């Protein structure tokens, strides 16, 4: 039971972060400066793909140097790669397709796994392995959000992490949908930018992606309890609270107004901000 809870915690954290940078890294020397640029830009998460020999060592170094980060392994195709990833400290495992042997192996170790699903048969295979969260890959090329919505209809509990062809401009629509846990993408960590060690560009592109994701808009000034609040709106309050708190804004949980399980309004009295749902 503890394992299931731990697994859910990682997925909950990924959901709040919202975007998982998908990294192809050639040299483990680059892992920590890259991870720091992502964290400073606002995304303390990374999927380090096993497309290069530096993956396991990179994961190990990031876990040691950046404890606040959620670090997973991507493109995990075999049980051996899964073992290497987990030994290095991977907190979640991602694969482009669904290999039942690898999924079982990873889940048995108490590590969350998001196997790639591209059609209803894949989803049913995932469900039969006890999974309700999957990767949707390659998202843009196989119909994007429209395909996810159509596919999700018969499988109420299933939620998706789309990757493949996503970028700062098209992520917003995915992230506003409740079926989406988070989006994965390599757009803010392009190989050539890593190769020339342009950590500042990675940080800035990450900041831009976070701002676009939160899509916060100014609604107006509201009076409440004798105070004036600046009302800001966002499509995902939990995510906005997470990211604003990382920037030092303190929200008062007691002020949260719920509609079902969703927060529709919450105040940060000290900062004079009221956050409401779009
Ligand atoms: C993945 O492994 O999930 C994808 O290659 C990421 O896709 P992108 O490079 O198109 O963002």
Image (spheres, grey):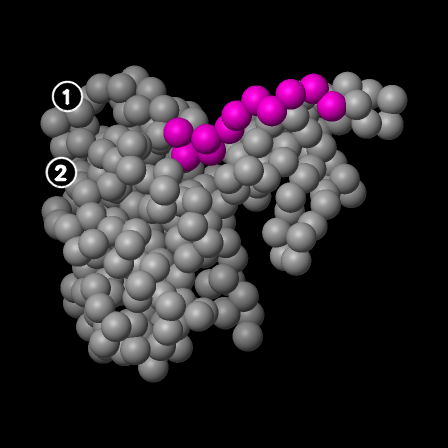
Comparing 232 with 116, the one in front is 232
Mark 2 or mark 1: whose residue is earlier in sequence: 2
Looking at the rendered structure, the number of numbered marks drawn on it comes to 2
Kindly identify which residue carries mark 1.
Answer: 196
Comparing 117 with 36, the one in front is 117
Question: Residue at (20%, 48%) from the top-left corner?
Answer: 140
Residue 91, position as x, y percentages in the image? 39, 55
Kindly identify which residue carries mark 2.
Answer: 26
Task: Tell me the element at label 2.
Answer: loop
> Where on the picture, by quarter, is residue 148?
bottom left
Residue 218 within the segment the image draws in magenta? yes
**Stretch of the chain drawn in magenta:** 212-222
- Residue 42, compared with residue 116, is above or below; it is above
Residue 88, position as x, y percentages in the image? 31, 53
Report how far apart the C-alphas of labels 2 and 1 lie in the structure.
12 Å
The answer to whether residue 95 is visible is no
Residue 155, position as x, y percentages in the image? 39, 72
Question: Residue at (55%, 75%) from the top-left corner?
Answer: 1
Comparing 151 with 92, the one in front is 151
- Residue 18, compared with residue 112, is above or below; it is above
């Amino acid at each position: 039971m503890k394992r299931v809870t731990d697994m859910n915690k990682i997925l909950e954290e990924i959901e709040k972060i919202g975007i998982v940078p998908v990294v192809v890294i050639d040299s483990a020397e680059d892992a920590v400066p890259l991870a720091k640029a992502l964290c400073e830009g606002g995304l303390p998460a990374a999927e380090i793909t096993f497309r290069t020999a530096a993956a396991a060592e990179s994961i190990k170094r990031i876990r040691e140097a950046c404890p606040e980060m959620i670090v997973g392994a991507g493109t995990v195709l075999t049980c051996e790669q899964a073992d290497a990833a987990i030994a290095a400290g991977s907190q979640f495992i991602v694969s482009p397709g669904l290999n039942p042997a690898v999924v079982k192996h990873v889940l048995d170790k108490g590590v969350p796994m998001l196997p790639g699903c591209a059609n209803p048969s894949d989803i049913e295979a995932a469900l039969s392995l006890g999974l309700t969260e999957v990767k949707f890959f390659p998202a843009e090329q196989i119909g994007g959000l429209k395909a996810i919505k159509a596919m999700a209809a018969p499988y109420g509990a299933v939620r998706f992490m789309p990757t493949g062809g996503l970028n700062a401009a098209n992520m917003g629509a995915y992230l506003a949908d409740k079926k989406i846990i988070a989006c994965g993408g390599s757009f803010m960590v392009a190989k050539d930018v890593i190769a020339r060690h342009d950590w500042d560009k990675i940080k800035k592109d990450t900041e831009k992606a976070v701002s676009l994701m939160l899509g916060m808009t100014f609604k107006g000034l509201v009076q409440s309890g004798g105070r004036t609040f600046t009302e800001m709106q966002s499509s995902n309050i939990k995510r906005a609270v997470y990211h604003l708190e990382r920037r030092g804004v303190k929200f008062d949980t007691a002020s949260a107004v719920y509609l079902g399980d969703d927060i529709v309004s919450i105040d940060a009295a000290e900062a004079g901000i009221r956050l409401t749902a779009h």
